[in-house]
Amino acid sequence: MRKRAAVLGSPISHSLSPAIHNAACLALGIEGKYDAVEVKENELEGFIHEVDRTPADWIGFSLTMPLKEAIFKVADVVDPLAKQIFSANTLIPTDDGWYATSTDVAGFIWALAENDALFSPLNARLDDQLRVLCLSYSNGISAPTVTKLVRVYKCDLVSGVRTWVHLPDEDINL
């Protein structure tokens, strides 16, 4: 049985995900196909209902903007971290329905650590260190992911963003 997965979002034609995932399947000997599917926010519910009605071998979906928040209207089960950051980038069919989760926080922290980007001490404060995370990001990294990172590492954030987002007052727990 050939396994199918796809990245959903809009716009999606620029996505490198199909090339990356299909190359991984080929290299690992997995019989599978990974596509990019243009799905706008107002089309998501209909798309998932259509997937449920067709006998395709879908094993899951990656979600990009604008669907990372819209998925909460469709998912039957949402993992606690995704609920806390109100963002999910993965949708998996399970016996209990569609399960939404997020790999953004863990992936973002891993990428920073791999590139020695966690953290730079600048001034004395909080255990004689002021921890500041400087980054520039766009739609690929969700504001909730950055919020989680700031809360977990108790650091200040200096950032370049396209859209200002209010950081929640309450702490977000892992």
Image (tube, grey):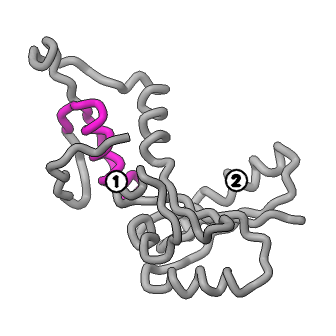
Counting from the top left corner in percent of width and height, residue 26 is at 83, 50
Residue hosting label 1? 84
Q: Is residue 59 left or right of residue 92?
A: right
Residue 2 higher or lower than 47, as above or below: above
Give x and y (percent) for residue 67. Answer: 45, 70
Q: Position of residue 87 (x, y in %)?
A: 39, 59
Q: Residues within 10 Å of mark 2 (few under 14, many from 20)?
A: some
Say which residue label 2 marks.
21
Callout 2 secondary element? helix
**Does label 2 or label 1 sit earlier along the sequence?**
2
Q: Is residue 2 left or right of residue 65?
A: right
Q: From the image, state whether disc 2 or disc 1 is nearer to you.
A: 1
Total count of labels: 2
> In the current view of this chain or complex, which residue is farthest to the top?
128
Residue depicted at x 75% and y 85%: 54
**Residue 96 pos. (x, y %):** 62, 68
Residue 60 in the figure: left or right of residue 68: right
Q: Residue at x 18, y 48 (%)?
A: 170
Q: Amino acid at mark 1?
A: Gln
Contact between labelled residues 1 and 2, with CB atoms less than 8 Å apart: no
Does the magenta portion include 71? no
Disc 2 to disc 1, C-alpha distance: 28 Å
Q: Secondary structure at mark 1?
A: helix
Instruction: Identify the image quadrant of the C terminus.
Output: top left
Q: Is residue 87 above or below residue 55?
A: above
The disc at residue 98 is none
Indicate the amino acid at tag 2.
His
The residue segment tinted magenta is: 133-157
Foreground residue among 104 and 37: 104
